[in-house]
């Protein structure tokens, strides 16, 4: 089987593309980012803080999607919901009223119900969340799994020590991971995840948990507790991809080793920068990853390419524009939850996934992305500007050139949806940027249209790859807001 990446809303992908009863293990880590206090969330007081700099608007409001979703649950759309799920959501509507929390629970109910369908009868499901809404989510999960012969197996606390603290309450230092199975027949490879009896508090380190060589030395090893001490990823961690809500591979290693076997199919319907799929790949499982933002898709491709040679050869990538019609559709996508997806796709694809997306809105000369290129004495910047309009005037590249000069950047790359022969011609007037390191000239301003990209044109600048780590550090400095998941 080919591994699969889907770029799109997981509800749509689950409904249209993932066949029933084909998945052995599903792990999800959906976004739930509320900076408000719990009382405000519960009582629907105030508005969500829509952070400016993040890949996905992971705030919840009672909007058209929520209204549609509630209608689908209550009318038992395509018969996918259990009676208990319908009654539960109807009851919660009375208690919580139509606000952020109900919108979140409706969204989760829609998706978990679909996940339940695609799980094999022997399948397992892990839901990663935090204590803010975990008690409601357990009700949702019970109502989907238990009436159909499934069962709750564990509430796992993932405990960690780092991060901030408040003097007003105990430090919040754990996430919750619910483990459910679709029936009483399921894989649980306890011998693959045994841990040492000694030092229970320090035992769950990435080096030890699920390490087969360790287990062989300690066949009397203990069955892991339902609280796991696995360090949170630091910014300097080797596996760090620069994705704010990235989870440690060690966490997924335990889940995948315990609840699946080689050759099984693993699904992550909110796959972020691809922790689940990267671990599944290492452990010789087949996998399906879904995400709604192109940054995520781009990072997964980069991660897999770096992890193992040839990994990209065995992947089907779905939902990414492949022709002019789909590129135009993406440019006109009005989904409020995802911003600038066309710009992201274009910048990341043209730069072979090596540029950094500029999340700031306005005030920065219309720069949508930055790539870092090595020169003799310093690393220089290439600035990207994307335009999806049909009318393209030379003033647009003049403006880009102005920003390149202002910022002391090496060059500017103007990416456009529609052909722009007039701009290609005009861009020659800006001359070249000379890279001393490899003694080569590059156009100061390049104009590239979507058609060129479909014909395989990619950024030609020296060793952009090598300065990737630096670019990631810069991305973190930009202070991209944490997507708490
Ligand atoms: C908390 S992050 C997951 C992080 C991931 N576990 C990792 O280690 O990288 C949640 C992800 O869900 C994605 N997402 C949110 N809503 C989605 C939807 N409806 N369909 C698909 N992906 C979605 C976001 O783009 C984000 O990448």
Image: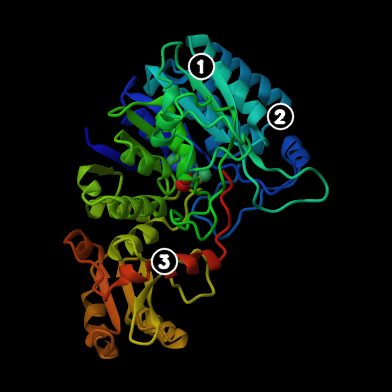
In the depicted view, which residue is nearer to us: 282 or 130? Answer: 282
C-alpha distance separating marks 3 and 1:
43 Å
Query: Counting residues from the N terminus, which is met first, the one under dot 2 or under dot 1?
Result: 2
Name the residue at the left extreme: 455
- Asked whether residue 34 appears in the rendered view, the answer is yes
Q: Along the horizontal axis of the image, is 158 left or right of 373?
A: right
Q: Is residue 178 above or below residue 100?
A: above
* Number of marks in the rendered image: 3
Q: Nearer the viewer, mark 3 or mark 1?
A: 3
Residue drawn at (66%, 46%) of the image: 34
- The N terminus, quarter of image: top left
Q: Nearer the viewer, mark 2 or mark 1?
A: 1
Q: Which residue is mark 2?
A: 96
**Element class at badge 3:** helix
**Element class at badge 1:** helix
**Element class at badge 2:** helix
The crowd level at tag 1 (other Cα within 10 Å; few <14, some 14-19, many 20+) is many
Residue drawn at (66%, 48%) of the image: 48
x and y percentages locating residue 438 in the rendered image: 24, 84
Q: Which residue is mark 1?
A: 145
Q: Is residue 283 above or below residue 401?
A: above
- The C terminus, quarter of image: top right
Q: Which residue is mark 3?
A: 469
In the depicted view, which residue is nearer to us: 272 or 262? Answer: 262
Q: Is residue 46 above or below residue 286?
A: below
């Amino acid at each position: 089987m080919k591994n699969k990446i889907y770029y799109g809303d997981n509800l749509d992908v689950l409904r249209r593309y993932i066949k029933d009863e084909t998945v052995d293990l599903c792990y999800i880590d959906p976004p739930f980012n509320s900076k408000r206090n719990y009382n405000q969330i519960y009582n629907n007081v105030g508005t969500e803080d829509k952070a400016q700099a993040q890949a996905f608007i992971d705030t919840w409001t009672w909007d058209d999607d929520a209204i549609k979703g509630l209608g689908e649950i209550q009318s038992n759309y395509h018969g996918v919901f259990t009676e208990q799920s319908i009654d539960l959501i109807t009851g919660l509507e009375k208690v919580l009223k139509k606000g952020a929390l109900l919108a979140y629970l409706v969204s989760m109910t829609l998706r978990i119900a679909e996940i339940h369908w695609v799980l094999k009868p022997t399948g397992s499901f892990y839901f990663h969340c935090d204590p803010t809404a975990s008690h409601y989510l357990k009700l949702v999960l019970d109502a989907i799994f238990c009436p159909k012969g499934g069962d709750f197996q564990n509430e796992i606390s993932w405990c960690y020590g780092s991060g901030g603290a408040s003097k007003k309450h105990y430090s919040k230092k754990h996430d919750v991971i619910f483990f459910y199975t679709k029936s009483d027949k399921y894989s649980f490879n306890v011998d693959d995840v045994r841990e040492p009896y000694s030092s229970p508090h320090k035992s769950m380190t990435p080096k030890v948990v699920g390490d087969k060589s360790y287990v062989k030395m300690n066949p009397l090893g203990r069955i892991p507790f339902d609280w796991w001490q696995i360090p949170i990823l630091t910014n300097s961690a080797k596996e760090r991809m620069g994705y704010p809500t990235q989870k440690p591979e060690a966490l997924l290693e335990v889940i995948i080793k315990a609840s699946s076997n080689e050759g099984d199919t693993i699904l992550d319907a909110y796959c972020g920068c691809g922790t689940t799929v990267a671990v599944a790949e290492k452990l010789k499982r087949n996998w399906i990853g879904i995400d709604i933002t192109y940054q995520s898709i781009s990072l997964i491709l980069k991660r897999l390419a770096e992890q193992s040679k040839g990994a990209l050869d065995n992947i089907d990538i779905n939902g990414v524009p492949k022709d002019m019609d789909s590129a135009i559709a993406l440019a006109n996508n009005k989904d409020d939850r995802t911003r600038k997806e066309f710009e992201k796709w274009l910048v990341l694809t043209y730069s072979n996934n090596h540029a950094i997306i500029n999340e700031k809105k306005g005030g920065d000369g219309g720069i949508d992305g930055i790539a870092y290129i090595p020169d003799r004495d310093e690393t220089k910047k290439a600035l990207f500007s994307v335009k999806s309009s049909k009318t393209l005037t030379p003033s647009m590249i003049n403006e880009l050139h102005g920003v390149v000069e202002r910022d002391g950047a090496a060059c500017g790359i103007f990416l456009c949806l529609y052909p722009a022969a007039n701009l290609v011609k005009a861009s020659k007037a800006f001359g070249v940027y000379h890279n001393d390191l490899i003694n080569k000239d590059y156009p100061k301003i390049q104009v590239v249209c979507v058609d060129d990209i479909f014909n395989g044109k990619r950024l030609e600048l020296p060793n952009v790859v090598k300065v990737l780590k630096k670019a990631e550090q810069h991305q973190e400095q930009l202070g991209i807001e944490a997507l708490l998941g």
